[in-house]
Image (cartoon, helix red, strand yellow):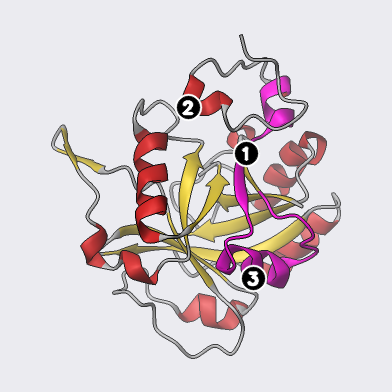
Amino acid sequence: MLIDLHIHASPASRDARDDVAAIARAVEPLGVDAIALTDHGPGCDYAAAAAALAERGIGLVPGRELNTPLGHVLVLSPDVVWLRDLPERSALPVPGGTREPFALVWAHPAGWRIAGAMVAPDPSKGAEHVHAVEILNGERLWQLDGVGIAETLADRLGAGTTGGSDAHRADAAGRCLTLADGARDAREVVEAVRAKATRPVLGSGWAAAHSHVYERPDLRAYAWPGNAPAR
């Protein structure tokens, strides 16, 4: 199963341009099996989103993106009621109260730019609680050392690895994906992330649709069969 594990949609994410229906239309021809809606706020109508995606044959992995002392952390779970009640800002570990499985992913961990200066990631601020590290982030592939930093963090933590587009508009969805072999639904995707049974890949459909060629060696290593050929 190929999943885009990091997508934002309006109106739940105020900085997103397109709604779920537009995202569904965009990813339908890209070979994506499911997407995770990881909005910052609690306003996602998961039932309506699942219905809009199902019309295009795409599954939904419910999620949120929280601000934590560690940075941005994706919370994935089939328990949509629990997800809605999570605060936008949270310490780690996240508040409990769910009997469903959940997975925490350290999103775009390569550091933050504040007043022009890059602040390095600090695993001491709660990294022991995450199940996976986002290696590929579609909005930050420009960061030349970002993939390597994320790989090193995942190795140090003994964590799993994922990919997600961090799309805030429909045409950015499907660029970076997570492969979860054998997963069939949201629960199994979450369990795969927890079990470190996932791997990040570059979306071949997105690359072909945008005539994009990945030339950097650190990115070519994540090419999925069928990707636009690398030079």
At x 54%, y 56%, the residue is 11
Is residue 91 visible in the rendered image? The answer is yes
* Residue matched to label 3: 191
Q: Give the percent coordinates (x, y) of residue 105.
A: 46, 60
The numbered disc on residue 201 is: 1
The amino acid beneath tag 2 is Asp
Q: Classify residue 75 as left or right of residue 125.
A: right
**How far apart are labels 3 and 1 at the CA level?**
19 Å
Q: Nearer the viewer, mark 2 or mark 1?
A: 2
On whether residue 196 falls in the magenta region, the answer is yes
Please tell me how crowded label 3 is: few (under 14), some (14-19), or many (20+) other residues with Cα within 10 Å: some
Q: Earlier in the sequence, mark 2 or mark 1?
A: 1
Residue range in magenta is 179-208
The amino acid beneath tag 1 is Val
* Residue matched to label 2: 218
Q: Give the percent coordinates (x, y) of residue 154.
A: 41, 52
In front here: 17 or 54? Answer: 54
**How far apart are labels 3 and 2 at the CA level?**
27 Å
